[in-house]
Image (cartoon, rainbow, N blue to C red):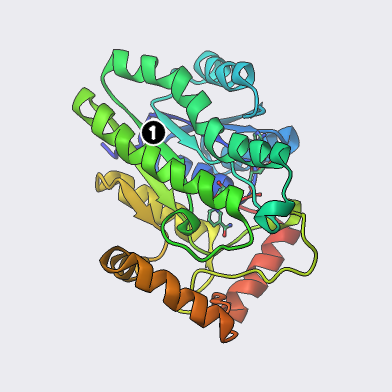
């Protein structure tokens, strides 16, 4: 039996972008998928698209900023599809600005969306998954939490670094109890995440993870995630080249940071490479989304 066949997956933030691609990929591999999203229309559209290619899915309205809403999504999934044994905590958002310009309330909102969304989901699912002795939790982090480059979006960086640390420690705690943990670390992926980005300091340079990275599609990263889950991987980056960068950072953190400062000062903003064919396909897909 395929590892996803007949399993129930709940994808928080599954209505668009990477979460939507994960919902499609898990459904293609045989899972029944609950798509939970603040954007109910997007959640239901994603579920309908999965049903159109023969999968089983439901769309659920959910706000991951609310403890009650996160718990309710879990209960509605159980009522409509059965208990979720795969939980994907994928909601996240970026904010741009110098750290001193970002109000504390905005730091709290960003940490709420990127980190507390995972903590809220864990509060609901840890007791359930530990009780049955199996399951798989996936937390979406980012390259921005793996090594320093994103100087203009620190609430995001801090929250994603915390998601990585939390995921690693959760694996220590949960894997002996039969529950797997994976932390998806996307690099640059073509989605509409920047559309909702608030900017607190005008005209800031947006620095990227390195020009050696090519922008990938959400479908690429969803496939990498599903393959990684099957292989039992814990840290799952979207681009394998990132391991070299992480090794350089671990070998000499001060040197790594000073090299990055010098590179940025020299005008290399580390922006990823965009393949024009991929960009054209992304724009066409926005016009008429299909799974
Ligand atoms: N796109 C990238 O390049 C990239 C890179 C690294 C990490 N990530 C991470 O991947 C994840 C998905 O990002 P994306 O690019 O697909 O973004 P996206 O903006 O395309 O999708 C985010 C989804 O989350 C939903 N959402 C927002 N607030 C919510 C809330 N309060 N409750 C429930 N749902 C809510 C949105 O409606 C949307 O469907 C995020 O955690 C993001 O930080 C993205």
In the rendered view, does 204 fall on the left or right side of 181? Answer: right
Lateral position of residue 198 relative to residue 234, left or right: right
Within-10-Å neighbours for mark 1: few <14, some 14–19, many 20+:
many
Pick the residue in front: 224 or 174: 174
| Residue appearing at x 31%, y 70% in the figure | 248
Q: Is residue 31 left or right of residue 168?
A: right
Where's the N terminus, which quadrant?
top left
Q: Which residue is mark 1?
A: 137
Say which of 269 and 217 sits in front: 269
Residue 272 horizontal/vertical position (percent): 54, 75
Provide residue 114's location: percent of width, then percent of height: 56, 40
The residue furthest bottom is 266
Taking the image as drawn, is residue 141 in sight? yes
Q: Quadrant of residue 12?
A: top right
Q: Position of residue 31 (x, y in %)?
A: 43, 35
* Image height of 279 relative to 288, above or below: below
Residue visible at 27% across and 27% down?
A: 174
Inspect this view and state whether residue 48 appears: no
Q: Is residue 196 above or below residue 250?
A: above
Percent position (x, y) of residue 41? 75, 36
Rendered position, 132 above or below 273: above
Residue at 43%, 18% in the rendered image: 83
Q: Secondary structure at mark 1?
A: strand
The CB of the residue at mark 1 lies under 8 Å from ligand 1 = no
Kindly indicate the quadrant of the structure image that contains residue 47.
top right
Residue at 42% x, 49% y is 184
Counting every numbered tag in the picture gives 1
Q: Looking at the image, which residue sits at the far left? A: 176
Front in this rendered view, residue 286 or 239: 239
């Amino acid at each position: 039996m395929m590892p996803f066949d007949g399993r129930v997956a709940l994808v928080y933030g599954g209505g668009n972008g990477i979460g939507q691609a994960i919902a499609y990929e898990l459904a293609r591999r045989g899972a029944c998928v609950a798509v939970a999203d603040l954007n109910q229309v997007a959640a239901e559209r994603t579920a309908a698209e999965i049903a159109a290619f023969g999968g089983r899915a439901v769309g659920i309205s959910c706000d991951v900023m609310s403890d009650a809403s996160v718990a309710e999504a879990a209960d509605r999934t159980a009522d409509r599809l059965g208990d979720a044994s795969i939980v994907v905590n994928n909601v996240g958002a970026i904010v741009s600005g110098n750290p001193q310009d970002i109000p504390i309330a905005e730091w709290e909102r960003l940490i709420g969306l990127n980190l507390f969304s995972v903590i809220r989901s864990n509060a609901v699912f840890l007791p359930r998954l530990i009780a049955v002795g199996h399951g798989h939790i996936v937390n979406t982090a980012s390259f921005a939490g793996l090594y320093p480059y994103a100087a203009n979006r620190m609430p995001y960086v801090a929250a994603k670094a915390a998601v990585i640390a939390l995921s690693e420690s959760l694996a220590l705690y949960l894997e002996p109890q039969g529950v797997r943990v994976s932390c998806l670390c996307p690099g640059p992926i073509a989605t509409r995440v920047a559309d909702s980005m608030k900017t607190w300091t005008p005209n800031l340079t947006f620095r990227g993870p390195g020009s050696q990275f090519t922008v990938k599609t959400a479908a690429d990263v969803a496939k990498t995630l599903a393959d990684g889950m099957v292989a039992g991987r814990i840290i799952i980056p979207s681009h394998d080249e990132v391991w070299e960068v992480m090794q350089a950072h671990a070998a000499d953190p001060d040197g790594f940071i000073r090299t990055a400062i010098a590179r940025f000062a020299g005008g290399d903003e580390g922006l990823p490479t965009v393949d024009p064919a991929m960009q054209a396909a992304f724009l066409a897909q926005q016009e008429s989304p299909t799974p």
